[in-house]
Image: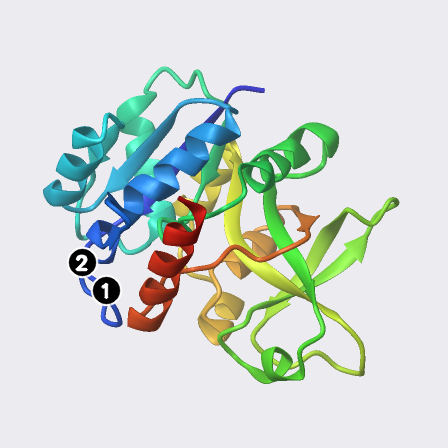
């Protein structure tokens, strides 16, 4: 298995414009994500950038970035474009799509996501999930719920469905984390397909993969990585970075 980690990023964001370049204790957000991916030490890391300013920031910090078409519709499409530019010889058979707004992602979580493709031969796409029992999160459509069939030991499970709706019944549920590890052929098949009916209904692109018949497994991690989506998140990330200095 030969993974490559690609981090899609673009400046256009309605809730936090220029988010990838936001300063967090002296480093741009996108560079902090890059550093955590490098610490995972599973393969080369690059940023799939939608804007030249992001390329400049990454390269200025000694990282690798490739400029992709800003009109691409999703991060997954940006990752595939970067993959074809960086690895036309197809040396890498696993592609990790790491969100560009999780500056403190545990490198171990990145490794666990990719490891699913090694330990589960039937897994086409690996992802992450966290157990959650919050009634507020259960009712929140912005919190994506994964319906998992857990294996033994229950540190991973096959994903049966993903939804924004509240889970039925009482008890914990699985909060999906949007980090993916694709077998290369699965990424190509996924990005070549149009949005599926369930994807359009739930506004969740991973449902396209399930409707294509691709198998998704989730590694269960202890804690959800903090995302930066709005000014309040950015303030919290800056405060955490200062505490970690």
Crowding near the residue tagged with mark 1, few <14, some 14–19, many ≥20 C-alpha atoms within 10 Å: few
Q: Are marks 2 and 1 in contact (CB under 8 Å)?
A: yes
Looking at this view, name the residue that lies furthest to the right: 152
SS class of the residue under badge 2? loop
- Identify which residue, 43 or 63, lies in the foreground: 63
Q: What is the image's colouring?
A: rainbow
Is residue 95 placed above or below 20 in the rendered structure?
Answer: above
Real-space Cα separation, disc 2 to disc 1, in angstroms: 7 Å
**Left of 98 or right of it: where is 146?**
right
**Left of 95 or right of it: where is 165?**
right
SS class of the residue under badge 1? loop
Judge whether residue 10 can be spotted in this image.
Answer: yes
Q: Which residue is mark 1?
A: 13
Is residue 160 placed above or below 136 in the rendered structure?
Answer: above
The disc placed on residue 91 is none
Q: Which residue is mark 2?
A: 18
Crowding near the residue tagged with mark 2, few <14, some 14–19, many ≥20 C-alpha atoms within 10 Å: some
Q: Residue at x 22, y 55 (%)?
A: 22
Q: Residue at x 36, y 15 (%)?
A: 89
Q: Residue at x 52, y 57 (%)?
A: 206
């Amino acid at each position: 298995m030969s993974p490559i980690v690609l981090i899609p990023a673009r400046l256009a964001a309605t809730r936090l414009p220029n988010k990838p370049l936001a300063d967090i204790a002296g480093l741009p957000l996108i560079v902090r994500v890059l550093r955590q991916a490098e610490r995972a030490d599973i393969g080369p890391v690059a940023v799939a950038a939608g804007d030249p300013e992001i390329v400049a920031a990454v390269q200025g910090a000694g990282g690798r970035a490739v400029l992709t078409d800003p009109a691409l519709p999703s991060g997954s499409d940006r990752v595939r474009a970067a993959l074809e530019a960086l690895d036309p010889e197809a040396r890498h058979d696993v592609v990790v799509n790491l969100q560009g707004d999780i500056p403190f992602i545990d490198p171990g979580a990145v490794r666990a996501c990719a490891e699913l493709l090694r330990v589960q031969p039937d897994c086409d796409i690996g992802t992450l999930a966290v157990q959650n029992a919050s009634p507020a999160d259960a009712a929140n459509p912005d919190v994506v719920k994964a319906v998992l069939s857990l294996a033994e030991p229950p540190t991973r499970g096959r994903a049966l469905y993903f939804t924004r709706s509240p889970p039925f019944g009482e008890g914990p549920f699985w909060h999906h984390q949007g980090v993916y590890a694709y077998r290369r052929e699965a990424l190509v098949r996924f990005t070549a397909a149009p949005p599926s009916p369930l994807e359009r209904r739930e506004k969740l692109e991973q449902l396209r993969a399930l409707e294509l018949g691709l198998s998704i497994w989730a590694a269960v991690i202890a804690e959800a990585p903090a995302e930066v989506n709005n000014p309040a998140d950015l303030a919290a990330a800056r405060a955490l970075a200062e505490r970690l200095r």
